[in-house]
Image: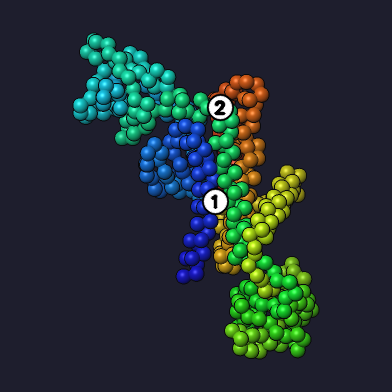
Amino acid sequence: MQMVQVVFLSILVFFVIVTIHEWGHFIFAKRAGILVREFAIGFGPKVFSHTHGETRYTLRLLPVGGFVRMAGEDPEVVDIQPGQTIAVRLKDNQVTKLYLDQLDLRKQVIRGEVESIDIEHELSVTLDVEGELTTYSIHPQAMMVVKGQDIQIAPYNRQFGSKSVGKRAMAIFAGPLMNFILAFILFGVYIQLAGMPVENPSYVKIGEVTDKMPAAKAGLVKGDVINNVNGIAIGGDRERLIKMIENSEGKPMNWSILRDGNPLNVTLTPVSMAGQKGGKVGIAPILPTRTASFGETIHYAGNAMVTMTKNIFEGFRQLIFGQFKLDDLGGPVRTFEVTGQFAKQGIDQLTLWTAILSLYLGIFNLLPIPALDGSRLVFLGIESVRGKPIDPNRESMVHFIGFAMLMLLMLAVTYNDILRLVKG
């Protein structure tokens, strides 16, 4: 049952931080008047799809991100050319549907050969219907129907490229911005859940107990208050407890604890752990806490944002200058693994980890790497300076190459993660 809960919480963490990121893109694109064709979580084949309003919401198979597809960002997939035979359906003297195939099956339509058509600016189509040319006005939200799919047309004023540089930049930057806001909120929630250390604590208690370690084998549980060890009162001296455990590797220790107000004596023997100094018993000793005030919560959240941002950039620095091994990188597999470990430690630790992941996702997406938000902002910055956009085909090629390289790196890291798990 616990495993099912851990898996569910791990998936929920991924879903929350990716959804809030894409929601940022989505909401600011809509505010700018851009037609959003798809709001997707994940990549690859569709698992779930639902259309509401102008947007199709999809859940895709591969949990490695998400995207918001805005009209005009990429070449439109359907193009109608003069000389092509189509069928149109009218409502209030405007074309509301353009049928591109299976024309013989369409009912209550006008069928003809396209003489001219403009679905971006003029919103009109001229058809040759049995030798007579007739021009029809096209509704701004008309649908093209092809291969059983309805695709809404995108007039130029609904396309990404028609908006000012500022509006486009905001639609792109809003994704990372929402991750920063989420991280700040979650850091605040964490300190509310974990509490602030009290001044002059009078006792140390057990926060977490690691399975199969001496503490767990001796029956210690989360919440036990440690009175004395080997007859020495611990009080609120957490560092003394840790030092005593480290110095007692391989030596039995007599612990006197309080559980729900009842005294209990146990004997346990600290063991060594690879790569760690001294003996370990498998507990996280914590001090008593109090509820954080509103001011303390804001202060802690701000400090946590600054500290973790420095740590993240230090990681990037080591990556750039080659001070890392492949094992130091982690893909979706390791992220889910670590998320599961935090989920086992309680909702407070999972909240802290989710805040860190959200902050990392926001910062990573702002790096000037092709296919990421940072690269798109660089192209917009260049456009702002030179007064005209870079050739969309060239920009699309840069993003495509960048995306392909990221996917190759992701595959290599994921393969290494799986190999590491198999080898234990």
For image coordinates 59% across by 23% down, the residue present is 389
Question: Height in image: 123 above or below 380?
Answer: above
Question: Height in image: 70 above or below 325?
Answer: above
Q: Quadrant of residue 407?
A: top right
**Residue 84 seen by the camera:** no
Q: Quadrant of residue 105?
A: top left
Q: Residue furthest left?
A: 108
**For the residue carrying disc 2, how many other residues have a C-alpha within 10 Å: few (<14), some (14-19), or many (20+)?**
few
Q: Amino acid at mark 2?
A: Ser
Q: Residues under labels 2 and 1: Cα distance?
A: 28 Å
Give percent across and percent down for residue 371. Answer: 58, 36
Q: Amino acid at mark 1?
A: Ile
Q: Which residue is mark 2?
A: 164
Q: Secondary structure at mark 1?
A: helix
For image coordinates 57% across by 67% down, the residue present is 346
Q: Earlier in the sequence, mark 2 or mark 1?
A: 1
Q: Secondary structure at mark 2?
A: loop
Kindly check if marks 2 and 1 are in contact, taking CB atoms under 8 A apart as contact: no
Q: The C terminus appears in which quarter of the rendering?
A: bottom right
Give percent across and percent down for residue 99. Answer: 29, 27
For image coordinates 59% across by 60% down, the residue present is 189
Q: Which mark is residue 17?
A: 1
Question: Height in image: 91 above or below 320?
Answer: above
